[in-house]
Amino acid sequence: MSDDRVHNLMEKIFPYLDTVETPEKDLLSILAVLQLNPSELSTLRKAEDTEPNPDVYKSQYLTVYHLISHSDKLSIAERMSNTFRALMYTYLLEEKTDFLYEMEPELKSFIPQLILRFMESFPFNAIGQSQWDEERQKPISYARAILPSISLCNHSCDPNAVPVTMTGSSCKTAILAMKPLKPGDEIRISYKPIFYMQNHPDRFEFLKRSFYFECACEPCVKGWEMPDRELDFRFVKPEYLLNKNGAKRKTKKSKLEHEYLKQLEEELQDIKEEVEKRENLVQNLQKVSDILNNLYTQYNSLLPLAQVAQHLFKRILVFIIVGYNSCANS
């Protein structure tokens, strides 16, 4: 269904939704349903009693339909409240719009079921959308969206990819690699600040409370700890170099490693100064990418210098997107 058509339908029921302070997940669910035509609705209704299989990922609508839900973990009161609201939204669509006009009876009865299904799965699958705030010098979240492919990504407290939103005339979100990836590697994003930004107990509790799973990523299993300082460009001492398993090592090559890492540190510092001036962003992105490639080949994310490089990589990405958005909006 066209965006204009969806907008017109929402415009007719929004005053009522606004009166009852409709939750974000409910609005997303209604919008998702309104974008479906009768043929797509019929396909989803037939998929209701089938188990998901690889074929479902060929269709965005089937992918969204089969996103994980934790409805079995909700209380009876929560489920009753969700069901009542789904019925109320269906009533509004029937009384205030022509969305259900001439729709087959079996599809009409499917609408509240579909809204309810989305209401109970979207909170666990929505991807945050943010824009760079120049005054605060950080990204500010302004919305959440259901993005079929990206919503399939699992979590890691040491992610190898990050969703990046390009706003402007066409709002699109892409997954960008943060680390070298080999064929067959699982793409993982973070649902919460990564391991060096928040301690393990707080991360673990948040994920269990908000997403109903006990995180078993490498930082959680191996008990990686936050640095005892804020991320900066201070250099890690050679005796605290780490191998790929996170174990401390001290070898005869420590002096050479120290010199090598010191050189990388100085290069990152030079790049950081240019980035703060918004200079040579694309070239510097490639430079930091190459540095990350080298660091992750020899060490892992526990190396403070790798954390600094990854943080700088994300910052450059943000500035490039900001520049793109400025051009798109001009």
Image: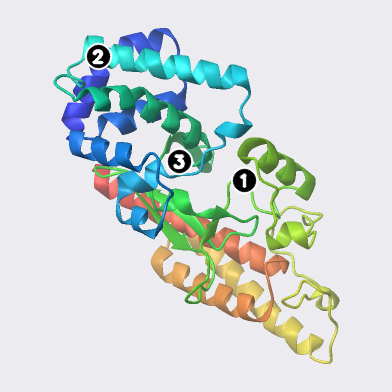
Mark 1 nearby-residue class (10 Å; few <14, some 14–19, many ≥20): some
- Report the mark closest to the observer, 3 or 2: 2
- Report the mark closest to the observer, 2 or 1: 2
Q: Which label's residue is closer to the chain start, 3 or 2? A: 2
The amino acid type of the residue labelled 3 equals Ser
- State the residue position of label 1: 192
- Relative placement, left or right, of 18 versus 220 is left
- Relative placement, left or right, of 67 versus 58 is right
Q: In the rendering, which numbered label is found on residue 130?
A: 3
* Quarter of the view holding residue 291: bottom right
State the residue in front, 146 or 202: 146
Question: What residue is at 47 percent from the left and 19 percent from the top?
Answer: 83
Percent x, y of residue 82: 49, 20
Question: What residue is at 33 percent from the left and 33 percent from the top?
Answer: 32
- Report the mark closest to the observer, 3 or 1: 1
- Relative placement, left or right, of 172 versus 66 is left
* Quarter of the view holding residue 217: bottom right
The amino acid type of the residue labelled 1 equals Lys
In the rendered view, tell whether residue 138 sits above or below residue 90: below
Q: Residue furthest left?
A: 102
Percent x, y of residue 135: 50, 37
Tell me whether the residue at label 3 lies in contact with that at label 1, contact meaning CB atoms closer than 8 angstroms: no
Q: Which label's residue is closer to the chain start, 2 or 1? A: 2
Percent x, y of residue 202: 75, 42
Percent x, y of residue 235: 75, 69
State the residue in front, 301 or 269: 301
The amino acid type of the residue labelled 2 equals Glu
- State the residue position of label 2: 94
Question: What residue is at 57 percent from the left and 36 percent from the top?
Answer: 70
